[in-house]
Image (tube, rainbow, N blue to C red):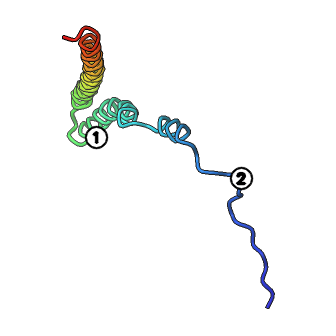
Amino acid sequence: MVEKHVPDAAPQDQSEPSDQQKITRRGRMFSARDLRATTIGWEIAIPIVGGPLLGFFLDRRLGTSPRWTLILLGVGVLAAIAAVIRYVKYEIYVIHKEENEKRAAELEKMKELIKEQERRRRQRYGK
């Protein structure tokens, strides 16, 4: 029986990605906010199209010309506007939250600097 040498599937010169590459690659992934932003179009389109479509079928079934179509078109537009307002409110909340976290981090950094300056002053002047 003759054994054949099978080369490794992965070449030897390729190594694990460095930490910097991992961070960069991870930074390119979609966040929950990005995925939520992609749904806003559907949250607008479905009520605006679905309402009149349902109203059209109700009008045909009940014999009430354009009444339900127009009513459900208005409901669909209001639902779409409510979805956009809800989305914008959430984004404003997240932006303010991130700003507050940055301010808190800067404040902590300033406190540490003040403590360090106070420590150096005490060392220098002995008080």
User: What residue sits 77% from the left and 75% below the top?
Assistant: 5
Q: Residues within 10 Å of mark 2 (few under 14, many from 20)?
A: few
Q: Please give the label number shown on residue 13.
A: 2
Residue 17 image point, x, y percent: 58, 46
Q: Residues within 10 Å of mark 1 (few under 14, many from 20)?
A: few
Query: Where is residue 49, by image quadrant?
Result: top left
Amino acid beneath label 2: Asp
User: What residue sits 71% from the left and 52% below the top?
Assistant: 13
Establish if 88 lies above or below 51: above
Q: Answer with mark 2 or mark 1, whichever residue precedes in sequence.
A: 2
In the structure shown, which secondary structural element does the residue marked by tag 1 occupy? helix
In the structure shown, which secondary structural element does the residue marked by tag 2 occupy? loop
Residue 127 seen anywhere in this rendered image of the structure: yes
Instruction: Identify residue for label 1.
Output: 57
Left or right of 92: which side holds 9? right
Q: For the view shown, which residue lies furthest in the front direction?
A: 126
User: What residue sits 29% from the left and 23% below the top?
Assistant: 98
Residue 1 image point, x, y percent: 79, 91
Observer-nearest residue: 45 or 116? 116
Establish if 96 lies above or below 8: above
Spatial CA distance of label 2 from label 1 is 65 Å
Q: For the C terminus, which image quadrant?
A: top left
Residue 70 seen anywhere in this rendered image of the structure: no
Residue 87 image point, x, y percent: 28, 26
Amino acid beneath label 1: Phe
